[in-house]
Amino acid sequence: MTDTSPAPTLIDGNICLRRARDSDLDARMAAGNSPRIQHMYGVAPEMCEPISRKQAQGWIAYHLRLKNAWFIDIEGELGGDICLHSVNMTDRRATLAMGLLHDKHLGMGYGTRALNLVIAYAFGTLKLHRIALRVLDYNARALSAYKKVGFREEGRERESALVGQTWHDDIMMGLLAHEYLSPAQEAGT
């Protein structure tokens, strides 16, 4: 029998990873589309457009369809999303994607804390062996957060993303279960 229940709520202090809900629509609309953040996803800042109600509804619906997807609440405010997709339980691997919504949350460590919650869940509860991700070569904040939790660069797709008029590399990164040190393990507890 396959377990189809959604992933549990995960909490670390003022960070809460929870299931998406239809009532998140107003919060997603209020967050808008920051050109600075959209650029990290590969959208040229001059091409960034306001989010439409239909796009916000689609974003929420997408997360509701995924079993291992969470919205990141930061001090009670919708701050972003994180998910494990392409989960393959035979090979015990998945792909991770994460994004914050507000410029004010950048550089505060919220992304790293959300990563640690999901990685601990993936390697602990789900018993995964490997987590992979892709990140644009210029996304220094994301690269720093991923490296901080143990991800290693495994390869590059050279000039695979055209952002504005400039080609950029996609960096492929991976983390194996035996390489991951949780914050508690790093502290020696």
Image (cartoon, grey):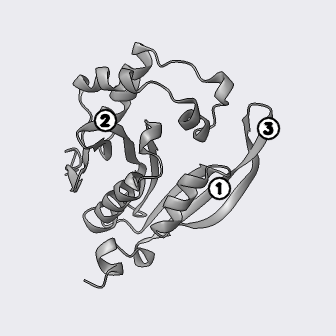
Q: Seen from this angle, which residue lies furthest bottom?
A: 188
N-terminal-most mark, 3 or 1? 3
Residue drawn at x 27%, y 34% is 20
N-terminal-most mark, 2 or 1? 2
* Type of the residue with mark 3: Thr
Q: Are marks 2 and 1 in contact (CB under 8 Å)?
A: no
Image quadrant occupied by the C terminus: bottom left
Q: Position of residue 83 (x, y in %)?
A: 38, 46
Q: Which mark is residue 166?
A: 3
Residue drawn at x 73%, y 44% is 160
Most foreground residue, 44 or 2: 44
Q: Nearer the viewer, mark 2 or mark 3?
A: 2
N-terminal-most mark, 2 or 3? 2
In the picture of the structure, the residue carrying the numbered disc 2 is: 78
Instruction: Report which quarter residue 188 is drawn in.
Output: bottom left
SS label for mark 2:
strand
Q: Nearer the viewer, mark 3 or mark 1?
A: 3
* Type of the residue with mark 2: Leu
Asked whether, in this view, residue 152 is left or right of residue 60, the answer is right
Most foreground residue, 127 or 179: 179
Residue drawn at x 43%, y 64% is 91
Q: Which mark is residue 171?
A: 1
Q: Nearer the viewer, mark 2 or mark 1?
A: 2
Q: Residues within 10 Å of mark 3 (few under 14, many from 20)?
A: few
Q: Position of residue 86 (x, y in %)?
A: 44, 48
Seen in the picture, residue 70 relative to 121 is either above or below; the reply is above
